[in-house]
Image: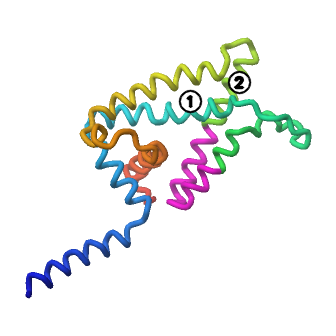
C-alpha cells in the first residue's frame, strides 16, 4: 500500500512541475534535448542568425503594393513589417524580455537589408540574390548539423524548432549575461 502511495506522489509531483513550467521553458528544454551534438550546436550558433537574416531579406524583397498614404515611407513598409509584428507578438506571449531583444535584432536586420537595397540601387547585386546566397549555405549547414543528432533521424525536421531556435540562442546569450528571460 505504501508503494502505491509513493508512486502516486512521485507522479503527482512530476505533473505539478510540468504544469508550472512556462511554454517557453518547455520549448527550450525540448530544443536542447534535440540538439546535444557539440558540432551541431556550433553550427546553430553561426547559421541560425544568418539563416534568419536571409529569410527576413527574402521576405523583404517580395514586391509590396505602392500605398499613396505612406508617402516617403513606402519603401520601409513591406511584407517584412508584418513578419516583425507577428514575431514580436509571438515572442511577447512567450517571454517579454526575449521579444524586446528580438525586436532590436529585427531592427538591426532591417538596417542591414536597407543597406543592401541601397547598394543594389547604386549598381550592386540584387538584394534578394545576396539573401539567397546566404540562405542556401546556412540552411544546408543547419540540416547537415541536425543530421548528426539521433533525435533528428527519428523525428525529422520540426517546424517549431525553426521558430524556437533564434529565441533559444538569444536565451543562451542572455543566460551568459545573467539576464533572466
Residue at 39% over, 31% down: 142
Q: Identify the mark at residue 54; answer none if there is no mark.
A: 1
Magenta highlight on residue 91: yes
Mark nearer the viewer, 1 or 2 = 1
Residue at 56% over, 22% down: 132
Depth check: 93 or 98 in front? 93
Instruction: Give residue 26's position: percent from left, percent from top.
Output: 37, 59
Crowd class of label 2 (few under 14; some 14 to 19; many from 20; radius 10 Å): many
Depth check: 156 or 20 in front? 156
Instruction: Give residue 157's position: percent from left, percent from top.
Output: 39, 39
Q: Is residue 21 above or below residue 49?
A: below
Q: Decide: marks 1, 2 in contact (CB < 8 A)?
A: no
Magenta highlight on residue 92: yes
Residue at 39% over, 48% down: 172
Q: Which badge, 1 or 2, is on the more N-terminal residue?
A: 1
| 5 displayed left or right of 84 | left
Residue at 70% over, 39% down: 79
* Residue 64, picture quadrant: top right
| 1 displayed left or right of 96 | left
Task: State which region is magenta.
Answer: 86-108
Residue furthest to the top = 123
Crowd class of label 1 (few under 14; some 14 to 19; many from 20; radius 10 Å): many
* Residue 124, picture quadrant: top right
Q: Identify the mark at residue 117; answer none if there is no mark.
A: 2
Distance between mark 1 and mark 2 Cα atoms: 13 Å
Amino acid at each position: 500500500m505504501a508503494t502505491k502511495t509513493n508512486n502516486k506522489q512521485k507522479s503527482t509531483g512530476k505533473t505539478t512541475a510540468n504544469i508550472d513550467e512556462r511554454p517557453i521553458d518547455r520549448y527550450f528544454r525540448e530544443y536542447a534535448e534535440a540538439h546535444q551534438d557539440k558540432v551541431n550546436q556550433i553550427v546553430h550558433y553561426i547559421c541560425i542568425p544568418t539563416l534568419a537574416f536571409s529569410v527576413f531579406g527574402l521576405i523583404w524583397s517580395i514586391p509590396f503594393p505602392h500605398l499613396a498614404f505612406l508617402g516617403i515611407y513606402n519603401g520601409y513598409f513591406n511584407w517584412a513589417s508584418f513578419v516583425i509584428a507577428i514575431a514580436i507578438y509571438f515572442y511577447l506571449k512567450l517571454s517579454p524580455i526575449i521579444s524586446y531583444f528580438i525586436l532590436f535584432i529585427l531592427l538591426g536586420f532591417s538596417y542591414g537589408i536597407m543597406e543592401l537595397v541601397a547598394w543594389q540601387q547604386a549598381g550592386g547585386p540584387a538584394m534578394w540574390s545576396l539573401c539567397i546566397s546566404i540562405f542556401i549555405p546556412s540552411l544546408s549547414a543547419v540540416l547537415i548539423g541536425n543530421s548528426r543528432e539521433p533525435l533528428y533521424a527519428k523525428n525529422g525536421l520540426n517546424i517549431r524548432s525553426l521558430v524556437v531556435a533564434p529565441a533559444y540562442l538569444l536565451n543562451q546569450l542572455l543566460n551568459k549575461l545573467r539576464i533572466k528571460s
